[in-house]
Image (cartoon, rainbow, N blue to C red):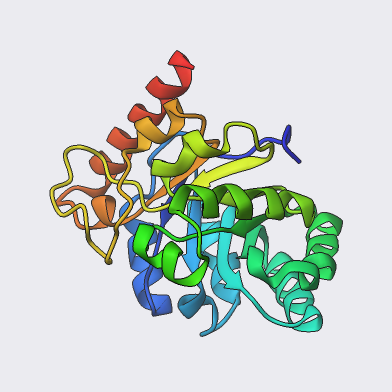
Amino acid sequence: MKNMQFPHTYLAVDDSTREGAIKKARMIEGVEGDYGIKLNLDLILRGSKIITEIGEITGRPVFADLKMNNGKRTMRELVQEVADRGAKMVNAYVQADRLLSEAIKTAEAYNVIFLGVTVTTHFDEAYCRKYYRRSLPETIDFLAKEAINQGCHGYIIPGTMLKFVSNVDGIKFVPATRPHWYNDKKTNDQEQLCQPGEAISNSADMISCGSPVFKSPDPKEALSLILDEVSAALAER
């Protein structure tokens, strides 16, 4: 899976309604470049057909951002459902541990990337000390290694933590990146901030970004700027 082709940038089309998601997808129609689309769980819950619809509108691979942590059957069937709708990537919390096995096997059967969620960008050192009795870097290192041990193809981590997983194989996905020109960097309660190009330069394989595009007066231009930033960082690696 590490060597398979995938976009380096995922555009977060985060909306709670089908109409809102389709409207956002139309906002960036015609933008060329190396990117896929990320859809949140709250949207998919209103009808998994939206994965197919957004894929057809954009012509891009879709990441179903499920963040699962359920029983074996539930996760297996969720993966099958979104894969049947055309999703090319899914995720679950690493803490689901051995319960991930069947979901990962199902993903592999569909040639779908399966990522393990470590600590989301909403949290910090105090959170990790409280719930994991480890520092944030120690928690990230531990969970990234567990993701690979459980069979995940990679893991999702804050961009600020990339240097702490330099010795851990697998796809590294950094969510909620914020370009330097975007002022409201803590939108959606972000604590771990990282620029798209910075994450790629520091060894991320994939990044996601949403608010800076859709809160811009010109979403197409904003997306193009982010894609250019990622391309430049990749060229310098």
Farthest residue to the top: give it.
236
Q: Position of residue 22 (x, y in %)?
A: 40, 67
The residue depicted at 27 percent of the width and 66 percent of the height is 189
Where is residue 194 shown, x and y percent of the image? 32, 42
Q: Residue furthest front?
A: 133
Observer-nearest residue: 77 or 104?
Answer: 104
State which quadrant residue 184 falls in: bottom left
The residue lying toward the viewer, choosing from 128 and 33, is: 128
Residue 68 in view: yes
Comparing 197 with 86, the one in front is 197
**How many marks can you see?**
0
Q: Residue at horizontal 45%, vertical 54%?
A: 135
Q: Is residue 92 above or below residue 11?
A: below
The percent coordinates of residue 47 (x first, y second) are 56, 82
Q: Is residue 93 left or right of residue 81?
A: left
Q: Does residue 60 appear in the picture of this structure?
A: no
Rendered position, 236 above or below 107: above
Give percent across and percent down for residue 221.
24, 39
Q: In this rendering, would 137 be left or right of 6?
A: left
Tell me the quarter of the image containing the N terminus: top right
Which residue lies at the image location 38% right of the left edge and 49% below the top edge? 29
